Structure formats: C-alpha cells, structure tokens
Image: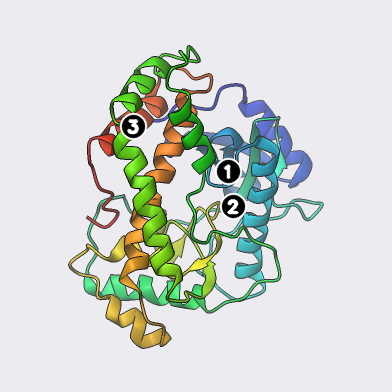
Amino acid sequence: MDVPPPPGVSETQIVEALERDWGLGVERLAYVPKGFGSYHWEAVTGEGGRRFVTVDDLTTKTWLGAAVEENHRALRSCYRAAHELAERRGLSFVVAPLPDRHGEVVHRLSARFALSVYPFVPGPAGRWGVQIGGDEARRVLRLLADLHGCEVETEVPDRGLEVGGRPLLEAALDELDRPCSAGPFSERARAELAAHRGEVVRLLESFDDLAARFAAGGPVPVVCHGEPHPGNLIGGDDGIHLVDWDTVGCAPAERDLWMFELCPEVDLDFYEEITGRRIDRRGLALYRLAWILEDLAAFVTVFRSPHELNAATQKAWDGLTGYLRGDQPRPYG
C-alpha cells in the first residue's frame, strides 16, 4: 500500500536542508512510498552518489513519548546511539544516520517533522510476515547477539517493562463519551474502541500481570533494536543490514526476540548457545502483547489528531480494527 508524502513538507525544503546542512549537491530526489509515521526518499547526489533520506513525523512516535518535543529529544538520542553503534562499536550491520556539518544526526524541518540522512544500502529489502530459512535466521540472531553485547555512552530511552504510549491509549479509553471530529476516521475509531473497550482493558491488565511475573525473574537490560522484523532487514553483498533505529532502547533481550518465536525455521536455542543468556518465555509473551498495545496507542492517537483519508490512515485503520478483533502480529510469518 503506497503512502503519500507528508503534508506540509516540500521537496524543496528537503533539498535545501541536504545542501545547507549536509553539504550534498542533490541532482534528483525520488519519493519512496513505504512506511508508517516515517517518509522516505532516495537522493542522487553529484558524481552518482546516493543517500537515503527519512522524514519522521514526531506526532506518531507515541512509543517515545506523549508530546512532540519529548519525542524529538528521544529520537535524537536513538539516532545518536545508532551512530555510536556503527562508528565506534564496530557494528557494520547498523545502518545509522549520517551527521550533518554540525555533528547532528537529526534536523528539525518544522514543529512536526524531523529529517535524517543515511547511506544508501543496495540490496533486497525484506517484508513483514515473510518466513526466513534456518541459516538466515541464525545470521539475524547472531547480529542481535552482537548488538545485545554492546554498551553505548549515548543515553538511550529506557524501554523496559512498559507499554510505549500507554497514557495516550488510556486517555482514549477514558474519553469514549466525547465526540471527536479530527478527521474522517475519528468517530469510526471511537465507536470501534468503545465496542472493544473491555478487551483492551483486559489486554492492559494481562500486560501488567505478565510484567510483574517477568520482572520477578530479574531480567537484565541490554541495547535492543526494538523492531528487527524482516521489513527492517536489507540483504547485501556484505551481509544483512538492520535499518530503522527510532525504536532503539535499553530493555531485556526478549524485546527483540519475541518476533522469532512463532517462525518454524528459527531456533531460539541458538541465541542461548552463543550468548549464554537464557530466554524467558514470559518475556516473549510480554513483548508480543506490548507490540499490540503500542500499535493500538499509535493508531488511536492518529485518529484523535487531525488526519486525512489516504493510504497511511487506511493502513492504521486496518491495523486498529484487526487488533481489536483478535489479530496477532506474526513478523516472520
């Protein structure tokens, strides 16, 4: 499903920022209509150089915080951590943002949008829901083991036993009696959430119960990517690359590993063997549930905010209604 460019951001703005702040002479800018909450372009620069450009919508980063300025600060920390992992910790699979002339990895385009620039990684990108073979699964798990074994000096968000965006979701549950006319999906979303309010409350209660039991086991936080699903993997001649680091944070390793549990070709025992770290199945269940609740928070927030009818909001609507009716996330098929 193709996602339209972000409202209120022109390609002229992007080109000017690339030239002024990154010193890139842009010859061509081509929009890549994929993603949710982030927008992408391929920039062709002088002498055939290529860069991948991302514009993040700070109003949709509900896992980072409840306010735009908070989200911007957290996003900058995430991207600084990714840059440190790639440049100072030697993790060549990390596709990190390139600093601008001032050493910053995020440039504020407006109150709502932030720009970052990446090296262009040629190679086939994966897709959500695609199974991977045993050898490829072991390669991905080895990359995650290397990541989880790293320490960074950059302060990264604490992504422990919590649901990102929970206050926003709970506010929506508490205000179901208030009509909302922010956009075409607002009232439909309010009605859908009202019809399933009991199920969402039970999900939150189940999360709290699981979190308490998982915490009793003494999980150790590590640096996690947060979303190592196939859509964030690019295969290249020099191996697998991991993109989209706006979800990086300190949390138990299970935050990254739950995605592999239901894929028949993935043997999580391999991760335990190479790391010596025991996987707690309660943690896998916890973060699978956190994924659902964080998506619900993000989708509900979109529909309680000004929005239009387009492919991006239709995708959010499909996600919201699917989860409310019992769909389960299966990143690796």
Q: Gap in Å between the C-alphas at discs 2 and 1?
A: 6 Å
| Residue 324 percent across, percent down from the top left | 28, 35
Residue found at x 68% / y 43%: 70
Residue at disc 3, secondary structure? helix
Residue farthest along the left direction in this orientation: 264
Q: For the residue marked with disc 3, what is the amino acid? A: Arg
Viewer-proximal residue among 330 and 80: 330
Q: For the residue marked with disc 2, what is the amino acid? A: Tyr
Q: Tag on residue 128?
A: none
Query: Dot 3 corresponds to which residue?
Result: 197
Specify whether 256 is left or right of 268: right
Q: For the residue marked with disc 1, what is the amino acid? A: Val
Q: Nearer the viewer, mark 3 or mark 2?
A: 3
| Residue 143 percent across, percent down from the top left | 44, 73
Residue 278, quarter of the rendered image: bottom left
Query: Dot 2 corresponds to which residue?
Result: 118
Q: Gap in Å between the C-alphas at discs 1 and 3?
A: 39 Å
Residue found at x 38% / y 31%: 316
Whether residue 254 is visible: no
Residue at disc 2, secondary structure? strand
What quarter of the picture does the N terminus occupy?
top left
Other residues around mark 3 within 10 Å, as few (<14) / some (14–19) / many (≥20): some
Residue 270, quarter of the rendered image: bottom left
Label 3 or label 2, whichever comes before in sequence order = 2
Residue farthest along the right direction in this orientation: 102
Q: Tag on residue 53?
A: 1
Other residues around mark 1 within 10 Å, as few (<14) / some (14–19) / many (≥20): many
Viewer-proximal residue among 97 and 314: 314
| Residue 48 percent across, percent down from the top left | 58, 49
Specify whether 174 is left or right of 137: right
Label 1 or label 3, whichever comes before in sequence order = 1
